[in-house]
């Protein structure tokens, strides 16, 4: 059965960077192939892992909305699922699917439902799935994220990041979402000021660890290069591998 790791958090906290580093750690240490899911309408995970999806789930949604001319003897849901297969971008040890942004002024509920249904069908083909969700809590309230083995709430070392993390943790409980384990990851820092630490420790919210600022990541991002190409000795790479090993309860090396 696939292990699902999802990420949530306030915008600008480094959530997609952490997702890319998680994909790298899992692929590098024998947990691939990894299915990377970019469930953020502001898609950036493709840049982080160096894969390009020619079509998004929302592209299929827009193309097939109101469609009546489907192949003979093929129900429309089957035809739509066939089209969704083209959304998968395949790489070495990692594949990518992107939700995208629907056209027009509308919510993403239909696209989320299509993505969830499609994932339910294909998820069994991968030992590990990493889902990079949109900033904030909309994906949780719509129950796009479900059956999650590990939910990593990404924060920075600010009060705003800590408060957003606390709200996400509270929402998971209020909605009774099927999350087996939840933890906070602090990006771009190695320690917390006391007021921030207090918010994250209230009610026993678990702190998984810190991912330090890493100049090598800045270099990759400026060069539009994949984080999968980072060297093993990069500080952020080591931090994510160690954190993931602790949270999964196994040695990744």
Image (cartoon, rainbow, N blue to C red):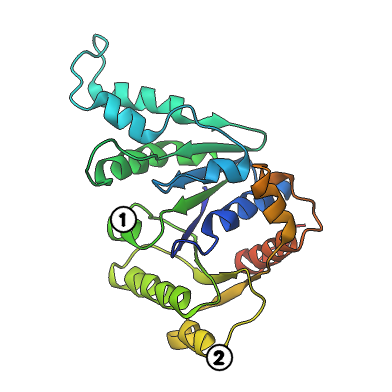
Judge whether residue 134 can be spotted in this image: yes
Residue located 28% across and 55% down the image: 142
Kindly identify which numbered label has been placed on residue 55. Answer: none
Label 2's element?
Answer: helix
Q: Say above or below: 242 vs 101.
A: below
Give neighbour class at mark 2: few <14, some 14-19, many 20+ (Cα, 10 Å). few
Residue located 51% across and 77% down the image: 158
Whole-percent x and y of residue 165?
44, 73
Q: Say above or below: 91 vs 224.
A: above
The C terminus lies in which quarter of the figure? bottom right
Disc 2 versus disc 1: nearer the observer = 2
* Mark 2–mark 1 CB contact (< 8 Å): no
Kindly identify which numbered label has been placed on residue 194. Answer: 2
Judge whether residue 30 can be spotted in this image: no
Kindly identify which numbered label has been placed on residue 143. Answer: 1
Whole-percent x and y of residue 141?
28, 60
Residue located 20% across and 20% down the image: 67
Q: Say above or below: 151 vs 174.
A: above
**In front: 176, or 187?**
187
Q: Is residue 221 left or right of residue 198?
A: right
Q: Is residue 37 left or right of residue 107?
A: right
Q: Is residue 89 left or right of residue 25?
A: left
Label 1's element?
Answer: loop
Residue located 23% across and 20% down the image: 75
Q: Say above or below: 7 vs 57.
A: below
Question: How many angstroms separate mark 2 from mark 1 (CA)?
Answer: 33 Å
Task: Classify residue 192 by image quadrant.
Answer: bottom right
């Amino acid at each position: 059965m696939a292990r699902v790791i999802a990420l949530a958090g306030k915008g600008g906290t480094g959530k997609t960077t952490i997702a890319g580093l998680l994909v790298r750690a899992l692929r590098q240490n024998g947990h691939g192939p990894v299915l990377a899911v970019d469930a953020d309408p502001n898609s950036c995970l493709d840049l982080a892992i160096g894969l390009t999806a020619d079509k998004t789930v929302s592209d299929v949604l827009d193309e097939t909305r109101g469609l009546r001319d489907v192949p003979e003897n093929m129900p429309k849901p089957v035809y739509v699922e066939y089209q969704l297969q083209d959304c998968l971008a395949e790489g070495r040890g990692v594949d990518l699917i992107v939700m995208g942004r629907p056209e027009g002024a509308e919510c993403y509920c239909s696209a989320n439902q299509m993505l969830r249904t499609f994932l339910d069908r294909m998820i069994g083909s991968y030992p590990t799935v990493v889902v990079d969700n949109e900033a904030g809590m909309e994906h949780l309230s719509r129950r796009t994220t479900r059956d999650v083995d590990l939910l990593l709430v990404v924060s920075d070392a600010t009060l705003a990041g800590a408060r957003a993390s606390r709200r996400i943790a509270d929402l998971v409980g209020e909605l009774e979402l099927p999350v087996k384990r939840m933890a906070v990851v602090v990006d771009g820092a190695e320690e917390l000021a006391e007021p921030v630490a207090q918010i994250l420790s209230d009610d026993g919210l678990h702190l998984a660890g810190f991912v330090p600022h890493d100049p090598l990541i800045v270099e990759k991002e400026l060069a539009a290069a994949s984080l999968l190409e980072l060297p093993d000795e990069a500080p952020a790479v080591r931090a994510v591998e160690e954190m993931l090993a602790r949270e999964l309860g196994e040695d990744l090396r």
